[in-house]
Image: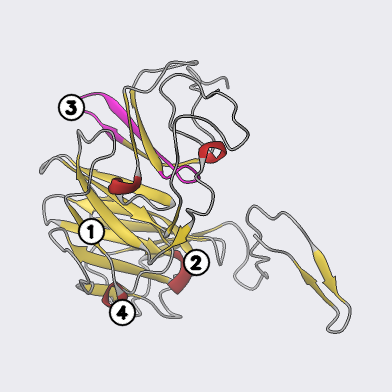
Amino acid sequence: MKPDRELHTPHGTFGIAVDEGRQELFLTVQHDNAIVVYNKSAKGAEAPLRVIQGDDTGLADPHGMALDPKRGLLYVTNHGSSHSVRDSATRSGRKREEPPGFPLSRDYAVPGSGRIGPPSITVYAKDVRGNARPLRTIQGPSTQMNWPTGITVDEDRNLIYIANDGDNSVLVFDGAASGDAAPVRVIKGSASLVSNPTGIFLDKKNSELWVTNFGNHTSAVYSPDAADDATPLRVVRSAPPNQAVPGLGNPHPIAYDTKRDQILVPN
């Protein structure tokens, strides 16, 4: 079936959120440490309505994104790597060639400006634009974040749920959390089946929390109040439970270790 329409977006768009009230479509751009906001009905080569990008934004390899329409907030999960960009020219001196309204790509990175910091959740007003500072940032060892990827919000209870890919866990934070805040509860353990989770969604109508697990072929469903090593209410699988998971995701080079007889594949 053909899509209703197609939209040309910057390379590396990852998270998606929609503000139904303002009919706006939000996309994170992981490679460029940016967010682009389109008209929800945008198509073709239509330019974004606005772009969020710059050193002050705190965006650092942004992935997941969720809106709290009740409080007018935008939550973004960041893996932690970032760089500065300059608008004047590329390293080779060429003029800018990005489509109109797009964020500056890696071609415009300032040499030597690369940084790797702790993962974070940055919080903005939903009408954020330009090089704006976050209203607050959740970041630090107490957060237990390690590659926080998917995010969903319960605006009624003021809670945020995080798919914590690198720690095989789901983290639940108070929506007002800031700084080095500990989660109010964590779902983690062998019985929970949480394994490299990347997607998460709160179904408020049916009072269910859905988590997709890259590490074991599953989508697992929990009570929104689940904690610790909670057993899922039910599980949807794309493979038998005993089938090995290769863990391949966007692999590029490959090498062979002759001493250990192993194949090495970075992802």
Helix, strand or loop under label 2: loop
How much space separates mark 4 and mark 3, taking CA atoms? 36 Å
Splitting the image into 4 quarters, where does residue 228 fall? bottom left
Residue 137 circle label: 1
Tell me: residue 253, above or below residue 189: above
Q: Amino acid at mark 2?
A: Asn
Q: Which residues are magenta?
A: 18-33
Q: Position of residue 225 (x, y in %)?
A: 21, 68
How much space separates mark 3 and mark 1, taking CA atoms? 25 Å
Residue 31 circle label: none
Residue 196 circle label: 2
Nearer to us of marks 4 and 1 is 1
Q: Amino acid at mark 3?
A: Gly
- For the image, the number of numbered tags is 4
Q: Nearer the viewer, residue 240 or 28?
A: 28
Nearer to us of marks 1 and 2 is 1
